[in-house]
Image (cartoon, rainbow, N blue to C red):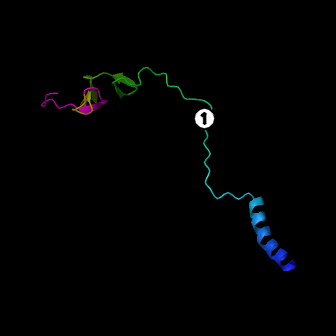
């Protein structure tokens, strides 16, 4: 009977000590959200504008940069309301 109790203690003690250590084998995730939200109040955020030298130009505007002329046009021909970009103005090609 005494050897039975010793054998039982040899099995129970390691198991109970592992439980008491509080080991966790699963994964945990911590999610932190910012306290302050960022608010964008610029009304021109979606405006179709070309910028040059800290100035805003609308579609069709032509500027001279050195000896080169640039025109503010649609960035992509297949978009009707896409972004604008400066395009090299070629006087021989209709814009």
12 sits to left or right of 47: right
- The answer to which of 37 and 8 lies nearer the viewer is 8
Residue extending farthest right: 2
Quadrant of the frame with the N terminus: bottom right
Q: Is residue 53 above or below residue 27?
A: above
- Which secondary structure is most common in the magenta stretch? loop
Picture coordinates of residue 64 (x, y %)?
27, 27
Question: What segment is highlighted magenta in the picture?
Answer: 80-95
- Pointer 1 residue: 34
Q: Residue furthest left?
A: 92
Q: Residue at x 26, y 29 (%)?
A: 74
Given residues 33 and 76, the one toward you in this image is: 33
Could you tell me which residue is drawn at 61 percent across and 54 percent down? Answer: 27
Report the residue at 38% width, 25% height from top.
46
Q: Nearer the viewer, residue 66 or 34?
A: 34
Query: Residue at image x 80%, y 76%?
Result: 7
């Amino acid at each position: 009977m005494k050897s039975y109790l010793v054998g039982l203690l040899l099995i129970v003690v390691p198991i109970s000590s592992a439980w008491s250590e509080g080991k966790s084998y699963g994964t945990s995730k911590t999610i932190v959200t910012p306290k302050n939200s960022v608010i964008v109040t610029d009304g021109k955020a979606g405006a179709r504008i070309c910028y040059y030298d800290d100035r805003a130009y609308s579609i069709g505007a032509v500027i001279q940069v050195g000896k080169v002329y640039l025109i503010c046009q649609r960035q992509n021909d297949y978009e009707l309301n896409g972004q604008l970009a400066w395009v090299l103005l070629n006087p021989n090609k209709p814009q």
